[in-house]
Image (tube, rainbow, N blue to C red):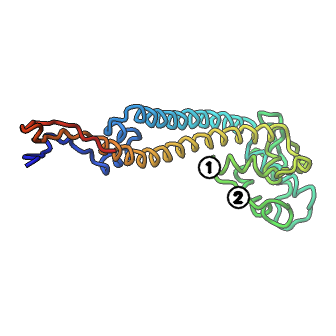
Amino acid sequence: QDQLDNAVISNAPQKSIGKSVLMSAVLPGAGQFYANSYIKSAIFLAAEAVAWGMYVSYNKKGDDQTDKFEAFANQNWTEQRYWTFVYTYVQSRYPDVEGFPYGQYDAMVEDAAGRLVIPDWQTAEEDLKEFASSQYISGFSHDLPSTTTQQYYEMIGKYPEQFGNGWADATYTDRYQGGYGDPSRENVTVMNKNYVGMRNEANQFYDKAAYGTMIALVNHVISAIDAGFTTRRFNQRQMQLTYNNRRLNGEYVNMFGLAVEF
């Protein structure tokens, strides 16, 4: 008999591929660490930190820029001037419109910017809303929110045809319009233009913050997939210590060996 025994003395424990995939899906790099691939683990974890750092940083910049443009709008655009424009525009161009409150708001006062405005503009607003959306004024297709919401701050800058006369550097007689991709058509006041630029900058910061979340999501997916392959390779590299009792030169000899799988 050439061989009396052949046995595996030790077999290194196998790592769970499913576990490693789940670990990296939750925290990128965790599955690689579990599979003893420490460099990969550090790379995926660093990518995760960069992605969320990018999100937090640019989101904070977006919030700060939003505070700036809202403060700018609160200081330089008012509903009082806007509704005063509606009143003066209709009164000057259509002096005989039935139901229009001619003369009711003639006792104007100066506002903080030195512009003549209707003092009791809240009452005027209710009276003038129907005229703002009537055939007497073109381009008035939007209803201004009653509170300073995100939509409010968007509309006063985005639609100068309707809201451009509410800026402190606007007149009640000029009509304004946006370029909408064609700068040659644009006719807005300096304040309106600066305000739109401030809002665009805030939106750019938020867009970059969104890229951070997308990078993090992709990092989770790639890390989870890689963790499965990394753990599989780890299991394939495990070594087995084998024992054999063989006959050599008329004698039985104990032989040990290492079996490595790739």
Name the residue type under label 2: Asp
Q: Nearer the viewer, residue 15 or 92?
A: 15
Q: Is residue 96 above or below residue 229?
A: below
Q: Residues within 10 Å of mark 1 (few under 14, many from 20)?
A: few
The reply, left or right, for residue 232 in relation to residue 94 is left
Disc 2 is placed on an element classified as loop
Tag of residue 147: 1
Percent of width and height locating residue 12? 21, 40
**Which residue appears at 88% of the width and 43% of the height?**
171
User: Which residue is at the far front?
Assistant: 249
**Which residue appears at 33% of the width and 45% of the height?**
20
Q: Residues within 10 Å of mark 2 (few under 14, many from 20)?
A: few
Percent of width and height locating residue 141? 76, 61
The reply, left or right, for residue 9 in relation to residue 67 is left
Disc 1 is placed on an element classified as loop
- The residue labelled by disc 2 is 143
Q: Nearer the viewer, residue 134 or 138?
A: 138
**Which residue appears at 66% of the width and 42% of the height?**
203
